Image: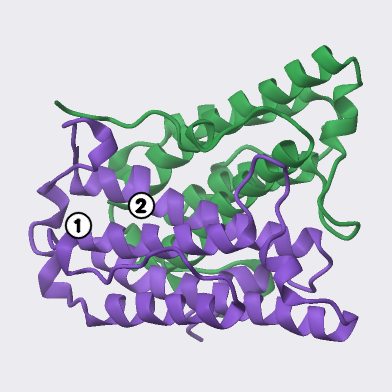
Chain colours: A purple, B green
Amino acid sequence: MLYQLTQVQFQKMLKNLSVILNKGAAHAEAKKFDVAVLLNARLAPDQFPLIRQVQIACDSAKLGVARLIGEVDAAPKHTDTETTLAELQQRITETLDYLASVTEDQFAGAAERHISQPRWEGKYLFGSEFALQHAIPNVYFHITTAYAILRHNGVDVGKKDFLGQMDYKS
Amino acid sequence: MLYQLTQVQFQKMLKNLSVILNKGAAHAEAKKFDVAVLLNARLAPDQFPLIRQVQIACDSAKLGVARLIGEVDAAPKHTDTETTLAELQQRITETLDYLASVTEDQFAGAAERHISQPRWEGKYLFGSEFALQHAIPNVYFHITTAYAILRHNGVDVGKKDFLGQMDYKS
């Protein structure tokens, strides 16, 4: 289940993020303004702008999975220097490629793994707690915030873009 | 795991939502404006206002769990008539009380259950798909959007308020 929750669902959500960013670019083009205005938009003066929301969404997904499988050093490194939409999309692509490279077998033992982060000062969560209380909420938080910044700036996005396709059966 | 993902984590997130709404009320009080202004705020003219975001967050949590356990008619009914913060908090409380009443045993078979909604025109998802692709993203989407509306209107909320306490071990 942790595999489905993170490796699979994070890829879906990052692809949805990529789509709404392109909708933002199309909106900028139609309105004849620089898409960089959107990338640097935020909902409050002390909130991270869209570009940073995307970076953190990617990192939450990438490091969430990397920590769950106990291979944090194997995740691709990113230096947070993106300034253009093309660079942001490249970062999403590299994150997707990394996630796609992780197999279900690598999640063996993930639920019981002790997971920590530098800022936790030695404290840890079990893998299942880390996924449910930290990685998953963070990914959804930053993708929804990116969506909200686009929505606030007039981009024609809807909740269906956020949720993406469902695997409906009939 | 579906129990932890929904019954447990949804309660945590709705409690966090209750806290940030109260922070909104404190902000309104300090700035001497009617909290109803916040409750009716939105990020775009064609987006649901805060009050509706809270209603949908509650419904996504309540109906998500009720559908997973196959007892959708047992969930409390709400008529979406709340106009005050007290009424919204009451709705959150009733949703929390319902979630707390559901036991882990009731989730037996939830992952394989065929789950549908009226608007799906007879199509269905397996319970695990419904939780991962629909219920969980919806709950996070609407709580994050509520957070974003408060944040945009100057309320002093941070991501820690959104995530809530972690079960850190040392």
Cβ atoms under marks 2 and 1 closer than 8 Å: yes
Q: Residues within 10 Å of mark 1 (few under 14, many from 20)?
A: many
Residue B43 visible: yes
Image coordinates of residue B88 in percent, x first then y, are 73, 29
The picture quadrant where one finds residue B47 is: bottom right
The picture quadrant where one finds residue A17 is: bottom right
Label 1 sits on a secondary structure element that is helix
Amino acid under label 2?
Ala
N-term-proximal mark, 2 vs 1: 1
Q: Residues within 10 Å of mark 2 (few under 14, many from 20)?
A: many
Measured in 3D between alpha carbons, the distance from the residue under mark 2 to the one under mark 1, in whole angstroms, is: 10 Å
Question: Pointer 2 indicates a residue of which chain?
Answer: A
The one nearer the camera, B11 or B112, is B11
Q: Is residue B93 above or below residue B39?
A: above
Tell me if A164 is positioned left or right of B154 in this view.
left
Residue beneath disc 2 = A135
Residue drawn at the location 60% of the way across and 57% of the way down: A144
Residue drawn at the location 76% of the way across and 84% of the way down: A26
Residue beneath disc 1 = A68
Image coordinates of residue A100 in percent, x first then y, are 29, 81
Q: Which of the numbered marks, if any, corresponds to residue B49?
A: none
Label 2 sits on a secondary structure element that is helix
